[in-house]
């Protein structure tokens, strides 16, 4: 593996973790689409700052992008507060309007500048190792490594310092306000952080991958745990896995690196969605099947108990007649009888079912409840 390959994977992993940290709170606040809106609308802030400074390396580009991200949030919330449109519709109105203005400005006034929309959307991760940072004439690594590393450090410090405030403002804003934690200020600080993260990662990975890293790993982690601290760690690990595996997928397929990494974030979420121990699709299906069997066992013991002393017991409690009386299919009736026998709830003699002591106790509990 060459040093360029290693550097690309390290930069992508750093971006993945930097995006996952604020992304966790966006997912928990049900504001996932806001990251998509911000990651596109910051382009207008970059364009305006470029027109003012005439430089693509000015730090004012970062400031302009962050301000535009906050303006996006404010506009969405102002529209939402009118109660004439819902939040998702407000995002759908604000985001294309601002982004399209940026695209028009670029094509009209900055067509010859390296600020094209393809670079913004897809990034230039493959070229990241070639843009080196030199200190006193000495090569100290790719520039993107320090840019994204600085953003990761900023996000990490913010989450660690304001962990309690973020947690309270996310799960109970009213209580946070009552305790004097200023949830509105925390909200806008978080949105500013999302803007800085989006624009800081543009040059390296593009906005599409920023959105993928910001939403998919936290959404996958949300299915794996109920604890915020673990969700942050799992999101970071899933992001790193998606970045590294996405790189090698692109290498094998000779395809876009950003596209392959975004695909792997989707694959990671799909794996979590299917196999998460408590909230996965398979666990949910297994839980529903167990509930169905438990309900059927209860019905069976109550049915047998209800007819044991009656003169029709020899008919009602026969295995072959269960499907008629309980409206079960013959296969399901045999399955339930088999499980009931293995659990010691019933016993079978010449096709006639009777309750054991455990079965009688269970039916009495259900009758009395």
Image: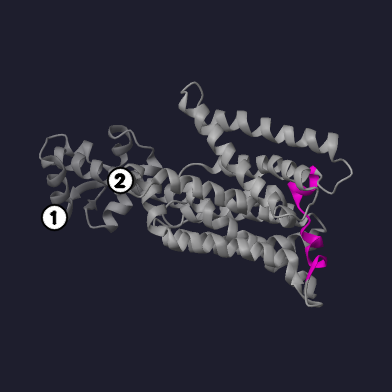
Q: In the image, residue 275 lies at what x, y percent?
A: 50, 56
Measured along the vertical axis of the image, is residue 13 above or below residue 219? below
- Residue nearest the observer in this picture, 172 or 69: 69
Secondary structure mostly seen in the magenta stretch: helix
Res. 38 image quadrant = top right
> Of all residues shown, which one is farthest toward the top?
84
Q: In the image, residue 77 lies at what x, y percent?
A: 50, 33
Q: Could you give the CA–CA distance between mark 1 and mark 2, rounded to whole angstroms?
A: 52 Å
Measured along the vertical axis of the image, is residue 361 above or below residue 130? above
Contact, mark 1 vs mark 2 (Cβ under 8 Å): no
Residue at 22 percent of width and 36 percent of height? 315
> Of all residues shown, which one is farthest toward the right?
112
Q: Which residue is mark 2?
A: 175
Tell me the mark number nearer the camera, choosing from 1 and 2.
2
> Of all residues shown, which one is farthest toward the front?
52
Q: Which residue is mark 1?
A: 357
Determine crowd level at label 2: few under 14, some 14-19, many 20+ residues with C-alpha closer than 10 A: few
């Amino acid at each position: 593996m060459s040093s360029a390959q290693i550097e690309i994977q390290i930069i992508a992993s750093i971006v993945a973790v930097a995006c996952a940290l604020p992304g966790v709170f966006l997912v928990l606040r049900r504001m996932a689409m806001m990251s998509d809106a911000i990651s596109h609308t910051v382009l207008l802030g970059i364009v305006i700052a470029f027109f003012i400074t005439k430089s693509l390396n000015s730090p004012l580009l970062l400031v302009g992008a962050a301000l535009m991200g906050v303006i996006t949030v404010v506009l969405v919330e102002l529209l939402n507060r009118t109660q004439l449109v819902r939040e998702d519709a407000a995002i759908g109105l604000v985001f294309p309007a601002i982004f399209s203005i940026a695209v028009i400005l670029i094509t009209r006034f900055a067509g010859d500048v390296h600020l094209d929309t393809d670079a913004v959307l897809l990034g230039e991760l493959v070229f990241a190792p070639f843009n080196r940072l030199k200190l006193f004439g000495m090569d100290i690594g790719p520039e993107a490594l320090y840019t994204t590393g600085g953003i990761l450090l900023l996000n990490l410090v913010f989450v660690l310092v304001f962990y309690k405030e973020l947690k309270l403002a996310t799960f109970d804003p009213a209580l946070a306000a009552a305790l004097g934690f200023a949830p509105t200020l925390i909200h806008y600080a978080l949105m500013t952080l999302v803007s800085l993260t989006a624009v800081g990662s543009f040059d390296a990975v593009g906005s599409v991958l920023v959105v993928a890293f910001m939403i998919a790993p936290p959404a996958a982690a949300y299915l794996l745990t109920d604890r915020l601290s673990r969700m942050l760690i799992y999101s970071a690990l899933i992001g790193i896995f998606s970045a590294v595996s996405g790189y090698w997928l692109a290498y094998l397929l000779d395809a876009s690196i950003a596209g392959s990494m975004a695909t792997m974030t989707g694959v990671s979420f799909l794996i979590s969605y299917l196999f998460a121990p408590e909230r996965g699709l398979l666990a949910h299906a297994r839980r529903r099947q167990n509930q169905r069997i438990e309900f059927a066992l209860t019905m069976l013991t109550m049915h047998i108990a209800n007819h044991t002393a009656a003169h029709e017991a020899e008919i009602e409690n026969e295995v072959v007649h269960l499907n008629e009386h309980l409206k079960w299919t013959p296969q399901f009736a045999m399955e339930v009888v088999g499980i009931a026998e293995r659990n010691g709830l019933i016993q079978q003699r010449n096709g006639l079912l009777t309750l054991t002591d455990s079965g009688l106790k269970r039916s009495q509990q259900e009758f009395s409840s």
